[in-house]
């Protein structure tokens, strides 16, 4: 696809986000849109956001569930960008009209002490570069109408990333059994879902491995200080105005946000 077309599609997505007006799936007009095209649109979208003052904070990994990958026709996860403009304080509030089709996911976040550049990285390699892990929410959203079911649309739309929340407690990776980490998700005080770390590729650290090696294949890397959201431990939860959502991760701590 021509660069000018990719740039125009990125601008359309950016405008949809700014104006809170979802657009038709990109694949309606461009049915042959490839994943390579989609990541190029995503990169252009990120470039536009940074040009307007947003600062890159890290990456999100999504589609870590085999069932989701099968539904989207993928054979691996996908990634998107995190920006400071999307950061929400733990125990904070989010204006509901800031979003269009929000859902929330409880995740384990990795914060890097050192840079990571693949290829060929393993779990011990990536864990040695992690400063700490923390409980997190990713608030996913879609700038495309009706939550598209085609992977190219979702990836182009920054992998459906909206906002993120990082919990206050920091834990060293040596003190956490990541695959067995327990999570209990509550909405308005009622438990609505549970999950464990092994829901994410068998081990959330493998999500970080995948991302670092994937970026290496594209000539990029993760740098110190970046946040990586590694994937949801339970199905995304639809939220409405007035909802208070909390995820308890036991010894890892908790994370909470309210939609107003």
Image (cartoon, rainbow, N blue to C red):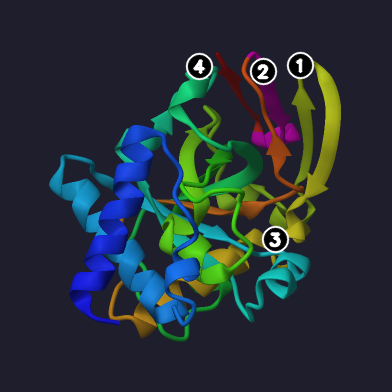
Of 119 and 240, nearer the camera is 240
- Say if 234 sits above or below 42 in the image: above
Q: Nearer the viewer, mark 4 or mark 3?
A: 4
Q: In the rendered image of this protein, does residue 215 appear above or below residue 188?
A: below
Query: Which mark sits nearer the N-terminus, 1 or 2?
Result: 1
Question: What residue is pinned by disc 2?
Answer: 244
Q: CA distance from mark 1 to mark 4?
A: 14 Å
Q: Nearer the viewer, mark 3 or mark 1?
A: 1
Residues under numbered marks 3 and 1 in contact, where contact means CB atoms less than 8 Å apart: no
Tell me the number on the disc at residue 200: 3
Residue 54 counted in the magenta span? no
Are dots 1 and 4 in contact, CB under 8 Å?
no
The numbered dot on residue 64 is none
Residue at image location 49% in from the left, 51% down from the top: 144
**Is disc 2 surrounded by few (<14), some (14 to 19) or many (20+) residues within 10 Å?**
some
Q: Are marks 4 and 2 in contact (CB under 8 Å)?
A: no
| Residue 37 falls in image quadrant | bottom left
Q: Position of residue 76 (x, y in %)?
A: 60, 77
Q: Quadrant of the C terminus?
A: top right
Residue 93: mark: 4
Using the numbered discs, state the Cα–Cα distance from disc 4 to disc 2 in whole angstroms. Answer: 9 Å
- Residue 225 appears in the rendering: no
Q: Earlier in the sequence, mark 4 or mark 2?
A: 4
Near mark 1 (Cα within 10 A), the count class, few <14, some 14-19 or many ≥20, is few
In the drawing, does residue 179 fall left or right of residue 78? right
User: What is the secondary structure assignment of the residue under circle 3?
Assistant: loop
Range of residues picked out in magenta: 242-252
State the separation of the CA atoms marked 4 and 3: 27 Å
Farthest front residue? 29
Marks 1 and 2 in Cβ contact (< 8 Å): yes
Q: Which numbered dot is residue 188?
A: 1
């Amino acid at each position: 696809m021509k660069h000018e077309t990719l740039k125009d599609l990125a601008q359309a997505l950016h405008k949809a986000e700014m104006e809170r007006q979802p657009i038709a799936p990109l694949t309606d007009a461009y049915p042959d849109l490839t994943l390579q095209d989609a990541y190029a649109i995503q990169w252009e979208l990120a470039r536009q956001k940074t040009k307007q003052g947003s600062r890159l904070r890290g990456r999100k990994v999504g589609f870590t569930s085999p069932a989701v990958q099968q539904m989207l026709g993928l054979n691996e996860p996908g990634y998107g960008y995190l920006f400071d403009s999307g950061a929400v304080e733990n125990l904070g509030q989010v204006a509901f009209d800031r979003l269009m089709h929000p859902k929330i996911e409880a995740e384990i976040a990795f914060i890097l002490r050192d840079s990571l550049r693949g290829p060929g990285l393993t779990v011990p390699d990536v864990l040695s570069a992690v400063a700490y892990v923390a409980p997190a929410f990713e608030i996913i959203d879609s700038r495309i109408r009706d939550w598209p079911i085609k992977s190219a649309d979702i990836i182009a739309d920054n992998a459906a990333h909206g906002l993120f929340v990082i919990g206050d407690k920091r834990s060293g990776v040596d003190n956490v059994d990541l695959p067995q980490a327990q999570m209990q998700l509550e909405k308005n005080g009622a438990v609505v879902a549970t999950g464990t770390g092994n829901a994410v590729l068998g081990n959330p650290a493998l999500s970080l491995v995948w991302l670092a090696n994937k970026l290496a294949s594209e000539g990029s890397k993760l740098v110190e200080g970046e946040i990586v959201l590694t994937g949801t431990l339970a199905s995304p939860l639809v939220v409405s105005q007035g909802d208070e959502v909390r995820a308890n991760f036991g010894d890892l701590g908790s994370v909470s946000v309210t939609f107003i």
